Every structure is written in structure tokens, then in C-alpha cells.
Image (cartoon, rainbow, N blue to C red):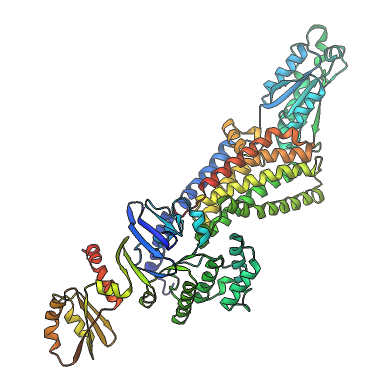
Amino acid sequence: MLGVSFARIGAVFLKELIQMRRDRLTFGMIIGIPVLQLVLFGFAINSDPKHLPTAVNVQDPSVYSRTLVRALENSGYFRVTNIVKGEREGAALLASGSVAFVVTVPPEFSRELARGDRPQILIEADASDPAAAANAVAAVAQLPSTVFNRELTGALAPLRSTPPPFEIVVHRRYNPEGISSYNVVPGLIGVILTMTMVLITALAVTREVERGTMENLLAMPLKPFEVMAGKILPYIFMGYIQVTVVLVAARLLFGVPMLGSYFELSIALALFIAANLSIGFTISTIAANQLQAMQMTFFFFLPSILLSGFMFPFRGMPEWAQWIGSILPNTHFMRIVRGVMLKGSHLGDMVADLWPLAAFMLAAMTIALMRYRRTLD
Amino acid sequence: MTATLAIDVSELTKSFGTRKVVDKFSIQVPRGQVWGFLGPNGSGKTTTIRMLCGLLLPDSGTGTCLGYDIKSQASEIKRNVGYMTQKFSFYEDLSIRENLDFVARIYEMADRKRVVDQAIERLGLVERQQQLAGTLSGGWKQRLALAACILHRPQLLLLDEPTAGVDPQARREFWDEIHQLAAQGLTVLVSTHYMDEAERCDRIVYLAYGTVLARGTVAEVIEGSTLSTWIVTGSDVRTLAGELHGCEGIDQVSVFGVTLHVSGRDAEKLERAIAPFRARTEFTWEKSSPSLEDVFIHLMAPFRARLTG
């Protein structure tokens, strides 16, 4: 401790405090990021999603099918949103992701039940996100032995004994083995792109301001759109390189299937990358230096992984969190990329997720262009 | 009218927050001349230059640059004006050639390669053209910046303290180049703190706290100041300076090594004030005309009094 001066430590300490106080944004982030994380992890995230949208395809309307549907709803995991007629309609809803389950009650169900033939109820689950479906599937396992206890009286009472009067067959669609990497790896494309694309553009413009080269750019006959387009384009290529790396790894290392078309995926990718780059550009018009740009990127990145359905099932979140999640480009891209890769979806099936991406991109670009300084004012 | 004037602005005013940085600034600069822009730090020189080249919008006032309206035709002005920023604002992580090439592309120059080659040759940097701009010395950076600013053959050159921190040799070469450009018809407005540079200008404009305090040729500005100066030579002028300080009629006393500049607004009062000191034999007194620097410091005096008092 020889020669250490507390006065000098105090001098540095004081200087740091003053600088910290001057940098309002950094100070705000020091407070804001823990609050954001607390809210997201504490309130928004729920790995046991309930009330999942369900389509029912009842081909034998009877007291049994009504009781069964009510029992499914009472389990808390299923919420009947669609009554479908025919398999194809149910399959389309499942493919587009608008329902998580399709429950099919076959024709002649009640007659076969009464005869003691142990008919089968089919539950098709969207297992592209295995975690989201797992608890619901587990909850229906006990149903057959108890659900019809009230209906099976008199002559039918013996059916209440084991084995149960009917069977529930669960088909895990799109990812029958429930391999989580099938779900995670395509999702990673969205996460990786969100982080690198936003950060890189945010830094690219802020760097010009920080190094003083912005003044020169502004003094030259360059239009804001020319600067933006010129800065964004190289990173779009970079984004495609990143995606290629992930796709190759997905195939070779994780064996993730690619059921859809690479071409359609790359169209959605262009939209998604451009949306992220526009956000980065907007950040760069607000941030005063590269550190601030990085902090703001992180602030955008956090909900993009936590609320997008990447780490936790989207449908498990409370409504307000789903609402925020629905604004984020990553949420929609996540559904598109999983849909194309695991379900073989076409862009036509994905319109519900494509237009929010496009809307987000346009809004972010407009804000960026409006905020971009044409003068030094 | 606009054919003969490169810059014609009147009553330009600009405030940042509540601080008025430029207040009713007017100048008319004829084409082909080199005008010097002087004034203390924070006097509004940079702000004025930025308004002239469309980087800042004036709060009020009107004017044209090369015949283009400074408020509505910023893009035409940018195309025909070369602006060299105070701080080096080219890319340190690009090479000399890459920087020049970038500028040539922005201005969509048809004969890009030839223009860049010529610029590099004129700079004398043919061997070092692949060197990163960030590794250049201060003087070379300034010369590169100048080369980049005149690459698109502008008609007006706005230079904001181009020689700050540059050694005398490099400064002289820089100024020789400015005069060569002026000889080719280019108009130059250059801000500086160096008196010797001011003396190389056709006209000077002295700005302080947003207002023009003096303008004209160097001789006109000195004459217009009504300042009288005596130069004292002797062995211990420092002690004498201390005695003269604050005497009635003496406004300025500055030591320059073995000489002393003593100045006053009123020639008669000054003579009366120094009379007792002139009797001393160890000093020789000589009446002289004030230097430009004396005049500027004199011009600043009322402001300084206002600031400190």
C-alpha cells in the first residue's frame, strides 16, 4: 500500500461519478435494464402455457363429444377457437400456426364407445415447439379413465373400469420426437440476425458522428436515403452469410429438416434483415456515441429474445406481453422460419406474419429518415 | 450581381438555445479573392461558415452563395462549394487514394480515376497513396483534406482553421497553394488565428461574439483602429511592463522578448502617460504603427471588460 493516496483515488472516483451523471442514457440503462429483465422474466415469461387455441373436428356430435370438449377446456390447457369440418381445414389451421391442437372425434364414436370397442380420439399437436405442447399433452393422459364417469351409468357402468372406455392418440406433428433443437436452431437465425444487424448499423452511423466524419458527409451532396441505402446494403449481404452458416450447421450438425423452399425463406429474410437494419439506423440517429448505441441495441434485443417465442412459448405469456411481442419483427420471423423449415409452409400461408414485418420495416425506415440530420442543427 | 459576388449574405443570425452565436452577419465577397476570417474562439466563425455551406440553417437573414439561396438551395451549394472542417473529417481507416476516390464518387465525377491520380500527384503522395490517412502527420492530413475539398473543382472554398497545429513550413506551402487556387479564379474564405496568415488575405473580417468588429484590408483595419503604439527596447522591459500596466492612457502592454509594445486609444494621453518613463536612459522609445495583433486585442478589450466586469 506504499504510496497509495486516497485523495487521488477519491479524485478519480469523483470524476467517474460526474461523468456517469452527465451520460444520462447510460445512467438510464443502468436502471432500465434490470427493470426490463425483472418484468420480462418475472411477469411475462411462463413456461407452462395454458389456454392454447384448439380446433375441434367433431364427426359424431353426442353427449360424449360435448363432455369431452368441456373436459379439455376445464383442464386449462385448451381453448376451443375453431370448429372445423374435415381434416384438411384442421391441418391448414395447424400449419399456419393459428391453432396449437386439432381434436378429432371420429364418426360412430358414441356407438363404438357403448359397444365397448374403445374408440380413439385423435389429438394432433403442433410440436414444432415441443415445450409449448408438452404439458397439455400430459394433461390429457388421465382423461379417458374419468371423463365419462357421469355419462356411463346403468348398463354402461361397467365401462368405467379399466381399461378406460376410449383411447386418446396424440400425434406430434412437425417434430414427432419432440427434439428441441428443431425448434431452437431455426429460431436462432432470427436471434442472431436481430443482434448483429441492429448493432452493426447502429454503430456504423454513430461512428461517423463520433469520429467527426459526419460533418463532411453532410457537407457533401448526399441525400439521407443515399447514406442509409449505402450503409444498409453491405450488411444485408452479411446477414445472408450468417443465415447460410446457421442453415448449414442446422442441417449437418443438428439434422434439422428443411421442408419448405430456400427461395421463399430468403424473401422473408430480406424483409426481416431490412427491418432490423432500419431499427439500427434509427438507434444511430438517437445515440450520441457508440456505447449508447450498444446499450440501446441491447434494450431492443432483450425483448426480441424473451418475448418473441424464441426462448419461451409465445402463447404462455400474458396478453400485454404478447401484444409487445407482436410488434417485434423477431416474433413474426420466428414463426415464418419455423413454419418454412419444420412445416414446409409457403409464404402464402404466412401472410399474417409477413405484413407485420413489412409494416415494422416501413415505420422504422420512415422514423430513421425523418430523424437523420440533414444539417448540424 | 451574383456573377461577381461569390458570397452575398446579409443579417445572418443564429442562436443555439438562448445564446446568440452569430448576430446580423453580412458580407459580400467578390469572386477570385482570398478573405480571412478572424476572431477569438467561440466568436461564431465556424457557425457562420456552416451557414454559408448549408450545414446549418440561419434563424433569420438572407443571402446567396455562388448565386444559390443559402436556405433553399443547399444541395446546389454543396455541389459547388468545398468545405474543409476544422477537425480532420476524412476516413482515417481508408487510404489516401480510397478517401479521394470516395469523394470523387460522391460528386459523380466522370473522369474519376484521372482526377484522383492528378490530385495524388499534386500532393506528391504517389508513393504513399496506399497509406492509411490516419497514419499521416497533421500537416499532411490538412493537405489531403484540402486536396479532397477541391477535387470536385468547387468555385468557392470555405476553410475552417485549416492550419491549426501545423508547422510553419507546411503552413507556408498550404498558403502558397491557396493563392495558386485563387489565381485560377477560386474564391476562398479562410478562418485563422494566425496574424501572418491574415496578412496574406485580400480582405479580413474580424468577428467577436457574433458581430463584425472590423473589416477591410489589413492596412484599413489597422488605420481604422485609431490605436497608437510605441515600441520600447531595453534590457529589462519586463519590469517596465509592470510599472506601465494600469497607467491612465495606456490600454495595452505586451512583452515580446526584448521589446515592449505599449498602446493606447488616445495618442495624446498615451504620450503624456509615457513621458516620465521616456526620461530613463536604459530604454529606447520609438513610435510605430500597431501590429494587427495589437489592433485585435484592442478590439476585444470592451468585450473582455464586459465579461470580467
Q: Point out the residue furthest to the top here.
A: A154
At x 41%, y 58%, the residue is A17
- Residue B115 appears left or right of A97: left
- Residue B246 appears left or right of A350: left
- Where is residue B263, by image quadrant? bottom left
List x then y, in percent, for residue B115: 61, 69
- Where is residue A53, by image quadrant? top right
Quarter of the image where the N terminus of chain B is located: bottom left
List x then y, in percent, for residue B245: 18, 77
Q: In the rendered view, would you say B174 is above or below A111?
A: below
Q: In the rendered view, would you say A129 is above or below B50?
A: above
Q: Nearer the viewer, residue A355 or A118?
A: A355
At x 73%, y 50%, the residue is A243
Q: Nearer the viewer, residue A230 or A175?
A: A230
Q: Nearer the viewer, residue A123 or B258?
A: B258
- Is residue A148 among the parts visible in the rendering? no
Q: In the rendered view, would you say B256 is above or below A360?
A: below
- Residue A182 appears left or right of A79: right
List x then y, in percent, for residue A5: 39, 70
Q: Point out the residue furthest to the bottom here.
A: B281
Quarter of the image where the C terminus of chain B is located: bottom left
List x then y, in percent, for residue B107: 58, 60
At x 45%, y 57%, the residue is B67
Labels in figure, total: 0
- Is residue A371 among the parts visible in the rendering? yes
Q: Nearer the viewer, residue B244 or B180?
A: B180
At x 66%, y 55%, the residue is A234
